Image (cartoon, rainbow, N blue to C red):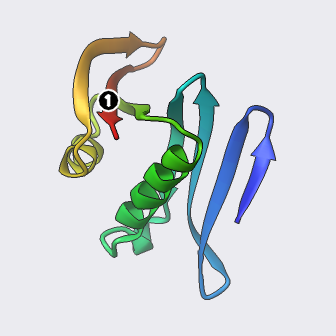
Amino acid sequence: MWKRHGKNNIYLIKSHNTVVATFQIKKIEGELHLEKLAIIPKYQGKGIGTYCIDAIEKIAKELNCNHISLEVFDKSEHAIKFYEKNNYIICDEKIHTLKYVEVKMEKYL
């Protein structure tokens, strides 16, 4: 299930009528940008994140995007390892906000 919000498409992942995950994406030229991926903690480790990544990559191909990018909190080791396990690589670019640092990651399809 998805809903357009501004320039982002918001997807909700349900299990037995309960929302267990969500992600937001937007297309920027030939690139798909993953804005957010969140899974309810009690549903983590059950393959839902991998399901979402597979769906995101399928959507990217349908939209003729050959590149996916995202930012992740630099202290979130589990998230970085998750994306690396799914063949995303860390770019040299870091994004500094007022409160934290994000690492840019990407994958070419």
Q: Is residue 7 left or right of residue 77?
A: right
Which residue sits at x=67%, y=84%?
17
Q: x and y percent of residue 81 in the render?
A: 20, 46
| Disc 1, SS | strand
Q: x and y percent of residue 19 in the render?
A: 62, 71
- Residue positioned most to the bottom: 16
Q: x and y percent of residue 83 in the render?
A: 28, 45
Which residue sits at x=42%, y=73%?
42
Q: Is residue 18 left or right of residue 99?
A: right
Q: Quadrant of the C terminus?
A: top left
For this rendering, which residue is in front, 24 or 107?
107
For this rendering, which residue is in front, 34 or 32?
32
For this rendering, which residue is in front, 24 or 100?
24
Q: Which residue is mark 1?
A: 105
Q: Residues within 10 Å of mark 1 (few under 14, many from 20)?
A: many
Residue 101, above or below 48: above
Residue 94, above or below 108: above
The amino acid pointed to by label 1 is: Met
Name which quarter of the figure residue 66 lies in: top left
Q: Is residue 69 left or right of residue 62?
A: left
Which residue sits at x=32%, y=34%?
108
Q: How many numbered badges does the structure rendering display? A: 1
Q: x and y percent of residue 37 in the render?
A: 49, 49
